[in-house]
Image (spheres, helix red, strand yellow):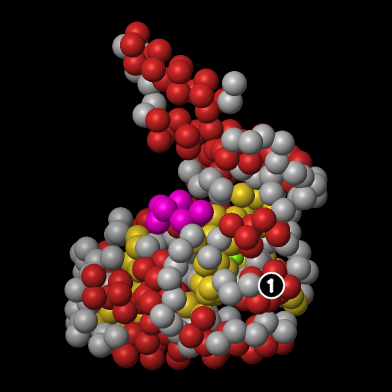
Amino acid sequence: MKISTIGRRLHLLNARLGINHAAPAELARTKKEINILTALPQVWAGQRSYKPEYPDEHLQGGLVSRESIIERYDTFLFDVFGTLISDAGPIPGANNFLKEAMANGKNVLLVTNVSKSSAEENFKELVKAGIKVDPQQVITAGQLFKYAAAENGLIGQPVLHIGNDSSRSYLEQAGLLPVEAENLDATADLRAVVVAALQSSSDPKALEDKVTKHLKSNKYIIPVILINPDKYVPKDNAARPIRAYELAANIARNTRQRFLFVGKPMSYMYTEALKRLSEMDKEPGRVLCVGDTLSTDIKGANEFGFDSLLLLTGTERLRFTFAYQLARAMKKTDAFPTWVLSGL
Ligand SMILES: [Mg+2]
């Protein structure tokens, strides 16, 4: 008897006995989660082509080959850093997967949390890694800021801007009035703090103290908006904390403000991906989000209702030494990928 049938019967029996139980959809999700968690050590150990032994769809979670992944889906939303490229260059297999998917007529979009707005700015790195896509196929968190600005009533309003020329220009394009931290004075009537990036020359602790003091002394109740919600970046073979995340999180915590994100896992990215596809006259069909980070790539896909593939080529593999630590992180983040592969 299939496990799914047993589950259903158990569910009916529980219902008859009046036992408080999970709804069928929740049962299915739990079963998927259990299968991912069971398969994880094998994937972690690099047995990525392990063939599914069970006919039941849920039992295949985590155990799949790259060929069947390409076959199963119509649209791939690919993360960039830790998935396609790292600071050491292209990640083996990823570009071939991309080419194969496109050669098979599949839709491919790159969805990256970088705070730059222009796809061309990211292109230098992609081109260097031999990845050939059109600018139209790339969506950055910076490009999505305009949606968060409109939603939070910031058009035409002054906001504190922590970033660079690129982020300043998309704040202005979205119709905001950016105020730089060095020009902060008591008369500025701020409506939000927008953290896009930290210049390498800036001192995050001094900036944090200055902004915290300003917000507290003016009794502001305004959101702190972070463009790129990634907490870590894969660098020099380790997962390094991102300073912009820490700065924005500290300011929001110190001053008890709402802390908002723009990039993945927020829905702006996925809505924009569907919009891009429709502009290209393409149907999304079955969508798979591919990425290396639980809290952004996988969490966002889970919340939007897309399937997801976690690759152990970036952040999570560098953050953890053992498979059980990743399993614990999945439970803690409540982010469960449909599939896990050690690489492509
Ligand atoms: Mg990544």
57 over 9 or under it: above or below: below
Callout count = 1
47 over 77 or under it: above or below: above
Q: Can you tell which quarter of the image residue 273 is in?
A: bottom left
47 over 259 or under it: above or below: above
Q: Can you tell which quarter of the image residue 25 is in?
A: top left
Quadrant of the picture in which ligand 1 is shown: bottom right
| Residue 1 position within the rendered picture, expressed as x and y whole percent measured from the top left | 59, 21
Q: 137 left or right of 219?
A: right
| Residue 300 position within the rendered picture, expressed as x and y whole percent measured from the top left | 45, 57
Few, some or many C-alpha atoms within 10 Å of disc 1 (few <14, some 14-19, many ≥20)? Answer: some
| Residue 331 position within the rendered picture, expressed as x and y whole percent measured from the top left | 53, 39
Name the residue located 76 percent from the left edge and 64 percent from the top edge.
Answer: 237
The residue lying furthest to the right in this view is 46
Name the residue located 63 percent from the left edge and 36 percent from the top edge.
Answer: 55
Amino acid carrying label 1: it is Glu
Front residue of 183/61: it is 61
Q: 270 left or right of 177?
A: right
User: Which segment did they paint magenta?
Assistant: 301-307
288 over 193 or under it: above or below: above
Front residue of 95/311: it is 95
| Residue receiving disc 1 | 100
